[in-house]
């Protein structure tokens, strides 16, 4: 199988329910558009719980590791241990699933050279309060791990984006059928990608 050309790399981006409810779709989309990346699929939907569990793709080792850390933290804080470590670990994903399914999200497939890395840079770190100024999460919200932990909920960080090109391809199949991905050319791609820029001057 031939390798995918770098300019055809795909990333999955999902504007989460908080981004929709705060009317930030246009601002978020424009951040990606201005880089020269291309949208090849987009849809508004209310996710299903099983779709979200498949999306997060965590195994028992992950649940146990995260749950053990929670048990240790609760022990250090003198808080009661009310369930097994594995259950605490599953609660992390359950809170994310509850958040994702609470209302509509906007799912998008974005194409372009190193789209995954570029989008991650634009979106910023997972925790809004420590995300860099100039990023979507750093500029548009104030949530933190500490606050979401106190409130026993998922951190509200506006956007999901793929971590790697391989993960993007796995995730895209959960949210889109192959027929929903539209292949087309943008005029600006000649400036971004063509080896020789010609035909500009009359």
Image (tube, rainbow, N blue to C red):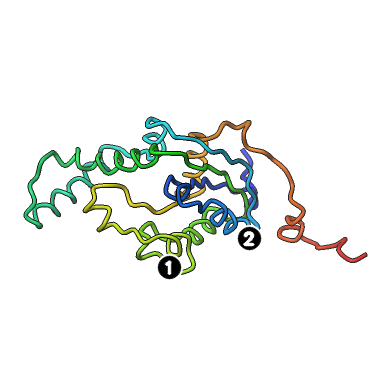
Q: Nearest the camera: 46 or 164?
A: 46
For mark 2, what is the residue? 34
Residue density around tag 2, few if under 14, some if 14–19, many if 20 or more, within 10 Å: few
Q: Residue at x 8, y 51 (%)?
A: 79
Rendering quarter of residue 67: top left
Residue 103 point in image, percent of width and height: 42, 39
Residue 138 point in image, percent of width and height: 43, 64
Q: Is residue 171 left or right of residue 156?
A: right
For mark 1, what is the residue? 132
**Quarter the N terminus occupies:** top right
Q: Residue at x 62, y 52 (%)?
A: 112
Rendering quarter of residue 64: top left
**Disc 1/disc 2 C-alpha distance (Å):** 19 Å
Q: Nearest the camera: 103 or 87?
A: 103
- Residue lying farthest to the front in this orientation: 22
Q: Is residue 123 left or right of residue 88?
A: right
Tell me: residue 177, above or below residue 123.
above
Q: Residue at x 19, y 38 (%)?
A: 87
Circle 1 SS class: loop
Q: Which mark is residue 77?
A: none
Tell me: residue 184, above or below residue 46.
below
Q: Nearest the camera: 119 or 104?
A: 104
Give the mark nearer the N terminus: 1 vs 2: 2
Circle 2 SS class: loop
Rendering quarter of residue 118: bottom right
Tell me: residue 84, above or below residue 202.
above
Counting the numbered discs, the total is 2
């Amino acid at each position: 199988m031939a390798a995918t050309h770098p300019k055809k790399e795909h990333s999955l981006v999902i504007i989460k329910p908080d981004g929709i409810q705060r009317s930030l779709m246009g601002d978020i989309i424009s951040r990606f558009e201005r880089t020269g990346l291309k949208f090849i699929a987009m849809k508004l939907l209310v996710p299903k719980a099983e779709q979200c569990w498949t999306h997060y793709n965590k195994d028992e080792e992950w649940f146990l590791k995260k749950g053990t850390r929670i048990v240790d933290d609760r022990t250090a804080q003198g808080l009661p241990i009310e369930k097994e470590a594995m259950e605490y670990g599953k609660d992390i994903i359950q809170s994310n699933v509850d958040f994702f399914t609470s209302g509509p999200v906007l799912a998008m497939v974005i194409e372009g050279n190193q789209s995954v890395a570029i989008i991650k840079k634009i979106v910023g770190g997972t925790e809004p309060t420590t995300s860099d100024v100039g990023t979507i999460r750093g500029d548009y919200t104030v949530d933190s791990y500490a606050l979401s932990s106190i409130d026993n909920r998922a951190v509200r960080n506006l956007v999901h984006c793929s971590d790697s090109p391989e993960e993007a391809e796995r995730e895209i199949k959960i949210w889109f059928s192959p027929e929903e991905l539209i292949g087309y050319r943008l005029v600006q791609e000649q400036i971004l990608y063509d080896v020789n820029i010609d035909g500009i001057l009359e």
